[in-house]
Image (cartoon, helix red, strand yellow):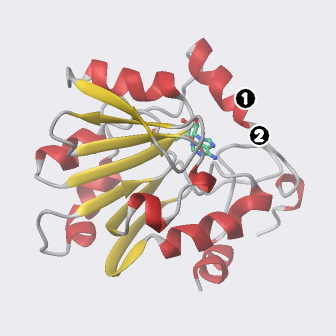
């Protein structure tokens, strides 16, 4: 659980934007994540018509899966290119509108509004803007956040959760001295203290 070599590492927003511009998106899983399929029941817990949040969503295909099951999906992502690719690759017509509370930010959504993707930093969001969620799919999100921002990220996520919501978190386990991240190594003990 020695994460010393990663704790000061910072990836700037521009670096993420550049990854999208140059197609350096090794984290994107074209066929979706098998762990969502495996733990779908845990996320849904017998409920239907949920509001599900995808922090740092990229163009995750799981957003389409859950929308097709009748849930309402909300994502947030700094790269507009990623969000546009999502809609185009799934042949989903979408429209754009500014987010009045966040200067320069916009919301891209399907015409029915069942998938709404906010193009801004997650740190610009609050429950007064996006509401609260019944479920969260956190893959490539907590592990992508800069180590110094982890507590801020988790505290924000907690404010976005309804009372009975469920949170599926995917992390990666490896020797943090051998790879600089992201994805960063977040030990289980730290996850417990972050979420309390
Ligand atoms: N969850 C997605 C993407 C993981 S990669 C998946 O499973 O495929 C992390 C993503 O977070 C990148 O697309 C990056 O552009 C985005 N990102 C990084 N910092 C962010 C921030 N502060 N707010 C919103 N998105 C951010």
Local packing at callout 2 (Cα closer than 10 Å; few below 14, some 14-19, many 20+) is few
Disc number at residue 11? Answer: 2
**Residue 141 on image: x %, y %:** 55, 51
Q: Quadrant of residue 12?
A: top right
On whether ligand 1 comes within 8 Å of the CB at mark 2, the answer is yes
**What secondary structure is found at the residue carrying circle 2?**
loop
Q: Could you tell me which residue is drawn at 80 percent across and 60 percent down? A: 148
Structural crowding at the residue carrying mark 1, measured as other residues with C-alpha within 10 Å and reported as few (<14), some (14–19) or many (≥20)? few
Which residue is at the front of the view, 52 or 43?
A: 52
- Give the quadrant of residue 149: bottom right
- In the picture provided, is 111 more to the left or to the right than 86? left
- Residue drawn at point x = 36 percent, y = 29 percent: 96
Mark 1 beta carbon near ligand 1 (under 8 Å) = no
The mark found on residue 62 in the picture is none
Q: Secondary structure at mark 1?
A: helix
Image x and y of residue 125, in percent: 54, 56
Q: Is residue 134 left or right of residue 126?
A: left
Residue 179 position (above or below residue 70): above
Against 78, is 86 above or below? above
Labelled pair 2, 1 in contact (Cβ < 8 Å): yes
Residue 152, horizontal then vertical, whole percent: 69, 67
Relative to 128, does residue 115 appear above or below in the rendering? Answer: above
> Along the line of sight, which residue is nearer the eye, 82 or 167?
82
For the residues marked 2 and 1, what is the alpha-carbon distance in whole angstroms? 6 Å
State the image quarter where residue 38 is shown. Answer: bottom left
Query: Which residue corresponds to mark 1?
Result: 15
176 sits to left or right of 136: right
Q: Is residue 94 left or right of residue 138?
A: left
Specify the quadrant that holds the N terminus.
Answer: bottom right
Q: Residue at 28% x, 50% y: name it.
A: 73
Residue 158: x, y in percent? 51, 75
């Amino acid at each position: 659980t020695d994460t010393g070599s990663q704790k000061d590492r910072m990836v700037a927003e521009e670096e993420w934007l550049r990854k999208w511009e140059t197609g350096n998106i090794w984290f994107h899983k074209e066929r979706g994540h098998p762990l969502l399929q495996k733990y779908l029941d845990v996320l849904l817990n017998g409920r239907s018509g949920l509001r599900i949040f995808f922090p740092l969503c990229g163009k995750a295909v799981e957003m389409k899966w859950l929308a097709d099951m009748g849930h309402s999906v909300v994502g947030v992502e700094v790269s507009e290119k990623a969000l546009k690719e999502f809609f185009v690759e799934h042949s989903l017509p979408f429209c754009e509108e500014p987010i009045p509370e966040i200067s320069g930010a916009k919301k891209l959504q399907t015409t029915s509004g069942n998938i709404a993707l906010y193009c801004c930093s997650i740190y610009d969001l609050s429950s007064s803007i996006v509401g609260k969620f019944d479920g969260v799919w956190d893959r490539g999100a907590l592990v992508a956040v800069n180590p110094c921002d982890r507590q801020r990220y988790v505290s924000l996520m907690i404010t976005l959760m309804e009372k009975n919501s469920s949170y599926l978190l995917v992390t990666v386990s490896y020797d943090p001295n051998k790879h600089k991240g992201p994805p960063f190594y977040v030990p289980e003990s730290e996850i417990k203290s972050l979420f309390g």
